[in-house]
Image (tube, rainbow, N blue to C red):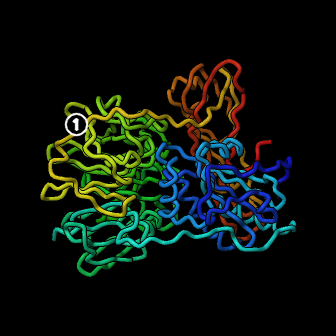
């Protein structure tokens, strides 16, 4: 058991509860249980990964462990209680959820990143905190130690499942048109692919195929692959090929393990490679391009050589243009290829971007924390977490502006943004059919919606609210500042230096001039920075490799987190910035 000061866990308070049958929970009610608080926000792909990591723990320790999702929202749309309830169903969250709409719990538990996990022992004390993914094994060992200490109460979970809904589709993700005129749709929450009639009203067939929250679909060019459609099997971290005539489904890329490694530029055997939440697909530059949402990159897939590799991005979650190996993205979720350009809906930066001649450019978008519904000049326009993109025959680009519930239009000639339609329920994709019709995958309404004729040409200009994610900034002093990433190996584990240094720390800043010195990559989790006066975001990527101690065939683990820390640098600020990867800052 990790030693340190005994800190009484702050009481659970929020706007309301989900998955409890309307009953609020308190730590006093849960005394004797081990409580795991999962601070998440439903836009965050890393948070969705953690939901998957926690499911085996919930099954193994269901009589002593209570997992509580603390939903601390990033985007304005995520503050909507109905949107939160929909997300809880969409992602199969089978534990109580506390609606932390005003970020009270986030501040009281000193969270600085999504996702953050906090463990409260059976006596009501906070015993561990950790950020990022890859903590399941360490949590299991910690829970075993807490059980061995005694005083754990065995009993049922406070989880109360909601009443299931009956609709033809359930949170559909993406759609394509088939050669016969029918539509193929990823029915994400039902873990299947469905074929619908051309008008989208009737079910032709449902293809199961072992999918897990599938998203992107790509009709393959003729004579390229032994399958007709490529499917981004998102939560399985795989690509699957679908033969339309027989319905046969075959895994063609992805080991099924989520990517946790270091970036390289080499081709890899497609079936052996670890992918990370592939979200959309496009045929561009004579290859398949994958929106690898889980690690903020684009990858390529060669269906002939059956290899995959990195196409664009560094895994740093932010917004930076330039040559594609060096760019920063944030959860790319929509792709559309047209001529020499590949258009990208970069959801977490609320941005529309494109690649042309080996370089990435941003058409609309300000960064990780700026969003809204504002039309006009593209340099001033704002989106809110867009998930889909499509190119019209005239070259204009339609954007599924998901959290604004709108379809937006970008004119590359005039560099202006307008609103085509609004009042939609989380539109996640747009399909321009061969007849010129525009279909919207209205994910939150569980349907496909055909825009009325003339809608595309009848645009409006919206001047809505501008928003900025108001996470409490870290106030730091100008000049020397020590950045410490706290990492304590889980019980029964040790740092693993078998293949080189066990830790890695990468630091950058937006704007770059905020960080006078200390940028770059090292193997020490503590670093002296020099900061200039001003405001901005420190991008910090830390990882630690561990292995089981004293085991003949030790299992290895990699823990990784990407922080975007908003900071204000001014006299009177702190001279130390602690970030917890795993452990407690003492």
Where 164 falls versus 381 (above or below)? below
Find residue 297 and report its horizontal and vertical position in percent.
43, 49
Residue placed most toward the observer, 144 or 22: 22
Which residue is the extreme one toward the bottom? 246
User: Residue at (81%, 53%) from the top-left corner?
Assistant: 125
Numbered circles on residues, count: 1
In-image side of 229 versus 492 (left or right): left
Placement of the N terminus among the 4 image quadrants: bottom right
Residue placed most toward the observer, 519 or 102: 102
In-image side of 82 versus 474 (left or right): left
Which residue is the extreme one toward the front? 22
Quarter of the rendering containing residue 439: bottom left
Look at the image and tell me whether residue 428 can be seen.
yes
User: Residue at (38%, 72%) from the top-left corner?
Assistant: 192
Where 546 falls versus 378 (above or below)? below
User: Residue at (51%, 71%) from the top-left corner?
Assistant: 163
Residue under pointer 1:
411
Which residue is the extreme one toward the left? 435
Numbered disc 1: secondary structure: strand
Look at the image and tell me whether residue 559 can be seen.
no
């Amino acid at each position: 058991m990790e030693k340190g000061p005994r800190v009484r866990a702050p009481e659970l308070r929020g706007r309301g509860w989900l998955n409890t049958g309307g009953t609020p929970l308190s730590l006093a009610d849960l005394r004797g249980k081990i409580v795991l608080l999962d601070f998440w926000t439903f836009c965050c792909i890393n948070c969705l990964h953690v939901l998957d990591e926690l499911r085996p723990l919930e099954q193994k320790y269901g009589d002593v462990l209570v997992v509580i999702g603390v939903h601390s929202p990033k985007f304005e749309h995520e503050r909507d209680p109905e949107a939160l309830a929909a997300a809880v169903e969409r992602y199969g969250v089978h534990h109580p959820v506390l609606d932390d709409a005003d970020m009270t719990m986030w501040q009281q538990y000193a969270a600085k990143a999504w996702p953050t996990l906090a463990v409260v022992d059976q006596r009501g004390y906070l015993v561990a905190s950790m950020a990022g993914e890859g903590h399941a094994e360490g949590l299991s060992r910690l829970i075993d130690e807490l059980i061995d200490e005694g005083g754990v109460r065995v009993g049922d979970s406070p989880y109360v499942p909601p009443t299931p809904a009956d609709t033809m589709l359930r949170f559909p993700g993406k759609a394509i048109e088939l050669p016969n005129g029918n539509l193929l749709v990823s029915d994400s929450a039902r873990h299947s692919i469905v074929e619908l009639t051309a008008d989208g009203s009737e079910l032709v067939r449902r293809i199961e195929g072992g999918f897990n929250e599938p998203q992107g679909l790509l009709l393959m060019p003729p004579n390229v692959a032994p399958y007709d459609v490529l499917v981004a099997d998102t939560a399985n971290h795989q690509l699957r090929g679908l033969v339309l005539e027989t319905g046969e489904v075959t895994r063609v890329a992805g080991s099924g393990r989520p990517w946790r490694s270091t970036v390289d530029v080499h081709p890899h055997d497609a079936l052996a490679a670890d992918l990370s939440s592939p979200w959309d697909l496009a045929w561009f530059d004579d290859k398949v391009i994958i929106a690898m949402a889980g690690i903020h990159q684009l990858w390529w897939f060669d269906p002939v050589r059956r290899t995959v590799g990195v196409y664009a991005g560094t895994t740093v979650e932010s917004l930076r243009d330039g040559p594609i190996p060096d760019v920063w993205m944030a959860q790319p979720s929509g792709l559309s290829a047209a001529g020499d350009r590949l258009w990208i809906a970069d959801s977490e930066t609320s941005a529309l971007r494109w690649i042309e001649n080996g370089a990435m450019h941003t058409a609309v978008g300000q960064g990780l924390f700026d969003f809204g519904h504002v039309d006009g000049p593209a340099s001033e326009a704002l989106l809110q977490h867009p998930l889909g993109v499509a190119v019209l025959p005239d070259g204009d680009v339609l954007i599924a502006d998901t959290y604004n519930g709108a379809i937006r239009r970008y004119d590359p000639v005039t560099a202006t943004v307008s609103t085509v339609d609004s009042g939609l329920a989380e539109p996640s994709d747009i399909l321009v059919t061969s007849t010129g019709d525009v279909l919207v995958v209205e994910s939150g309404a569980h349907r496909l919606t055909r825009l009325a004729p003339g809608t595309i040409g009848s645009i409006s200009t919206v001047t809505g609210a501008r928003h900025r994610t108001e996470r409490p900034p870290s106030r730091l002093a100008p000049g020397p500042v020590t950045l410490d990433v706290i990492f304590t190996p889980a019980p029964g584990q040790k740092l693993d230096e078998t293949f080189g240094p066990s830790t890695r720390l990468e630091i950058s800043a937006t704007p770059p001039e905020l960080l006078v010195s200390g940028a770059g990559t090292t193997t020490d989790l503590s670093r002296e920075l020099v900061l200039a006066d001003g405001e901005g975001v420190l991008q910090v990527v830390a990882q630690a490799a561990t292995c089981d101690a004293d085991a003949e065939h030790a299992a290895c683990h990699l823990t990784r987190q990407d922080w975007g820390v908003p900071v204000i640098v001014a006299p009177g600020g702190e001279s130390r910035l602690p970030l917890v990867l795993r452990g407690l800052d003492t």
